[in-house]
Image (tube, helix red, strand yellow):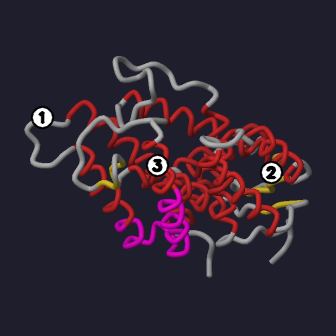
Amino acid sequence: MTRFTSLETRLDAAAHRLLDALPQSGLSGAAVEFLVFGLKQAWACLYGGALLGLIIATRHAWPEAAAINRYDFLFVAALSIQIAMLAFRLEKPREAWVILIFHIVGTAMEVFKTAQGSWIYPEEALFRIGGVPLFSGFMYASVGSYLARVTRIFDMRYSAYPPLWATIGLAAAIYANFFAHHFLPDARLLLFAATGALFWRTAVHYRVFRFRHRMPLLAGFLLVALFIWFAENIATWSRAWLYPGQENGWTPVSIAKLGAWYLLMIISFVLVSLVHRPKAPGEA
């Protein structure tokens, strides 16, 4: 089974044609490599980007007299996007299972966290569990979607990858701490230390277009978490949800939330590793 969808294959073919038409210099090759990297990253972000776009659009254009609530529309739209991506083979069925699992994991945490007052959803919703509109689970699912798709699209391989049982244990401990720190001492610093110890030697090897590149996996985690934090600022500005202190006027999300997203993203990464089992460079 090929690891690419048809669009990804066409993107590589178009890049070859572009490279053939440019002067044969190292600069041209590097520029095309960077362009393909950006396009494939955008393609991997398709689900999350579409959902974030709808959140922004409905914040400014949702009519007060609409027949359904904004949050309910976002739920139906997010579900429709997921179905369409599967129907048009823009996403692999196995990747959809990862999205579903992370959706459930995220929604369970949302129900608990909103009950604790960590954040609120300020608008009404018919499709909800407690104070949590069901579209919120798709925001977590979009992280899983990105990681599953980017792993496949860039044919990611890993050197010095830790044992799978250890990564599962770390993910379980991180998830438990998101609940337990409301009643027990916060183990976040210990979890950061455990993440560093487990992945310190691990590097991700990825193919953009013609060449393979290498990056420390911990740096990759940080970059993904940083982009999620940027998206979270946009989402709270669009009043998808609000943190304490944002009810009477938007303020930037604390940079401290970057750490929470770093840890939460690791849960998603480990879930993806159960579908796309980590392979070493050169492994078939």
First in sequence: mark 3 vs mark 2? 3
Q: Quadrant of the C terminus?
A: bottom right
Q: Secondary structure at mark 1?
A: loop
The span from disc 1 to disc 2 (Cα, nearest Å) is 50 Å
Q: Which residue is mark 1?
A: 64
Task: Give the vertical position of 87 relative to 99 (above or below).
Answer: below
Where residue 116 appears, as percent x and y from the top left, is 47, 40
Task: Give the vertical position of 152 relative to 55 (above or below).
Answer: below
Seen at 13% across and 36% down, the residue is 63
First in sequence: mark 1 vs mark 3? 1
Disc 2 crowd rating (10 Å Cα; few below 14, some 14-19, many 20+) is few
Seen at 85% across and 67% down, the residue is 163
Task: Give the vertical position of 270 relative to 24 (above or below).
Answer: below
Seen at 43% across and 42% down, the residue is 114
Q: Which residues are magenta?
A: 83-105
Dividing the picture into quadrants, the one containing residue 168 is bottom right
Is residue 11 found left or right of 282 in the rendered image? left
Seen at 45% across and 55% down, the residue is 107
Q: Secondary structure at mark 2?
A: strand
Amino acid at the residue labelled 1: Glu
Amino acid at the residue labelled 2: His
Q: Which residue is mark 2?
A: 213
Q: Main secondary structure of the magenta part?
A: helix
Q: Which residue is mark 3?
A: 110
Where residue 241 appears, as percent x and y from the top left, is 39, 36
In the image, 33 versus 101, the foreground residue is: 101
